[in-house]
Image: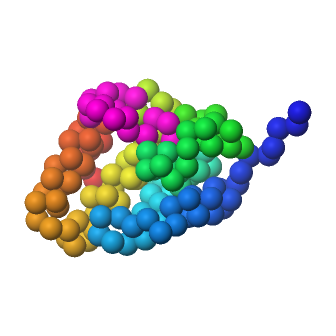
Amino acid sequence: MAQDPPLTVPEVAATARAAHEGQTDKAGRPYAEHLAAVAEGVRRRGGDDAQLAAAWLHDAVEDGALSREWLERAPLSRRTKDIVLALTKRAGEPPEAYAARILATPGARLVKEADLAHNADPARLAVLAGPTRTRLAEKYTRMRALLGLTET
């Protein structure tokens, strides 16, 4: 049985946009805007196509937009799949274990760095209620520290 050629980054982007259709972020913006911003952050940080594809899909399994089975069957590189799975938080998982999995997965740290950068963008946080803004800012700062990411 012939293997399908891997999806291109634009095909992965279209798939992710469709999978997250109708979803919004905490500020009420279309979720696809966050995915596009993370992919752009990966591109700016020198990420490769596997990392760009993972950026588009980084929340798909965790959010239930796409199943783990879909991911395993999808015509994607093993590296892209591994990055997406590394970035998929598990119920009850401590932040330290999540960070360790990211650090142990080649290419995942750069994608998470781009994700955290967009999540912690002051303009995005500014529209949230004070307690939510504070809680999320602290969460993102802690994860950056666990991943060994220094402020730039």
Residue found at x 20% / y 54%: 136
What secondary structure do most residues of the magenta stretch adopt? helix
Task: Look at the picture and state if 19 lies above or below 147.
Answer: below
Report x, y in % for residue 13.
Answer: 60, 60
Colour treatment of the image: rainbow
Q: Nearer the viewer, residue 129 or 141?
A: 129
Q: Read off the magenta span.
A: 84-101
Report x, y in % for residue 91.
Answer: 34, 35
Residue found at x 82% / y 38%: 3
For this view, does 46 lie left or right of residue 113? right
For this view, does 72 lie left or right of residue 63? right
For this view, does 81 lie left or right of residue 7? left
Whether residue 102 is visible to the viewer of this picture, yes or no, is: yes
The image quarter in which residue 148 lies: top left
For this view, does 130 lie left or right of residue 34? left
Q: Residue furthest left?
A: 131
Task: Look at the picture and state if 114 lies above or below 123.
Answer: above
The image quarter in which residue 82 lies: top right
Task: Look at the picture and state if 49 lies above or below 19.
Answer: above
Residue found at x 27% / y 43%: 144
Report x, y in % for residue 139.
Answer: 21, 47
Q: Nearer the viewer, residue 104 or 67?
A: 67
Whether residue 46 is visible to the viewer of this picture, yes or no, is: no
**In the picture, which quadrant includes the N terminus?**
top right
Report x, y in % for residue 57.
Answer: 53, 51
Residue found at x 39% / y 67%: 24
State the count of labels. 0
- Look at the image and say whether residue 85 sits in the magenta stretch: yes
- Look at the image and say whether residue 13 sits in the magenta stretch: no
